[in-house]
Amino acid sequence: MRYIKHNLIENFNQFTPQERASLLIEEMSKAYTLYPEAVANILDSTQVKYKSKHPQDLADAVSQNSGNLKMLNRVIKLSFLVNQDGKVIRPNHKKTISFRDVMRQGTPFLKQYPNELKEATLIARDMMKEDLYSKTLDSTMVNYLNMDGQKPIAPTTTKSMMPTIIILGLIGFGLFAYYKTKKS
C-alpha cells in the first residue's frame, strides 16, 4: 500500500508492529526521494559514505550503516516530516533543501512526538537487520522513483514479483514482531 498523503503520527500509533515497520519503509523511501540533499547532509554529518545523491544510493548507505543511531535518528526525523499530520503542503518544494532548513521548519512538530521518534528509530534499526528489508526497500524505492519521474539505478525486482515481495515482507515483519514480543 502506498501512503502518499496521510496522518503519519495517527497511523503510527494505531498500527501493529509489522504495519509500523512497513510504514517506516514507505516514509523513509519518500524522504530519500523528496529530500536527497537533506539525506546527504545527514550522511555527511555522521561520516557515512555514499556513492551519489540518487535516492537508491542514499538508501543503501543508510541500510549499510543501520548501527549508527545518530544517523538513523536523523533520517527518521526527516521521514516523519514528509507527511507529519497529513496537512503539510509544500509549495515550491525543492529537492536541494538542506537538512538544517527542513529541521528549522519541522522541529516544533517533532518535539511533540519524542516517544514515537525513539520507537521508530529502534524499529528501523531492527528491521534493517532482516534479510527481507532490502528487497522490500528496493521495491518501494522503485515505486516512488517511478512516481517522481526518476529512473531507478538497478531495479532488482519486476512488477510481476512485487505482490510476492510485499507479502513476504509483511510475513517477515510479522514474525519479527512475534519473536520480539515473545522475548519480552
Image (cartoon, rainbow, N blue to C red):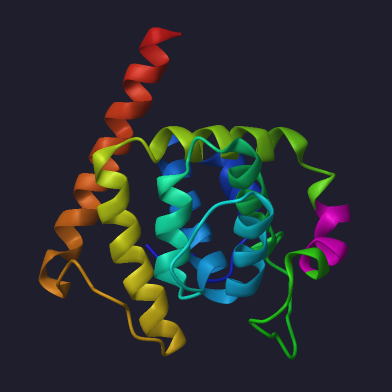
Q: Residue at x 85, y 66 (%)?
A: 105
Residue 26 in view here? yes
Residue 9's place in the image compared with 121, above or below, is below
Residue 16 in view here? no
Query: Residue 25: percent from the left, percent from the top?
Result: 44, 53
Q: Residue at x 66, y 68 (%)?
A: 38
Q: Would residue 37 appear left or right of 132 to someone viewing this image? A: right
Q: Main secondary structure of the magenta part?
A: helix
Name the residue nearer the viewer: 47 or 61.
Answer: 47
Residue 36's place in the image compared with 26, above or below, is below
Residue 128's place in the image compared with 60, above or below, is above
Q: Is residue 147 magenta?
A: no
Q: How many marks?
A: 0
Q: Would residue 100 appear left or right of 57 to someone viewing this image? A: right
Name the residue nearer the viewer: 154 or 121.
Answer: 154
- Residues shaded magenta: 102-109
Name the residue nearer the viewer: 4 or 73.
Answer: 73
Name the residue nearer the viewer: 152 or 182.
Answer: 152
Q: Is residue 108 magenta?
A: yes
Query: Residue 30: percent from the left, percent from the top?
Result: 52, 68
Query: Residue 4: percent from the left, percent from the top?
Result: 52, 71
Q: Residue at x 41, y 75 (%)?
A: 144
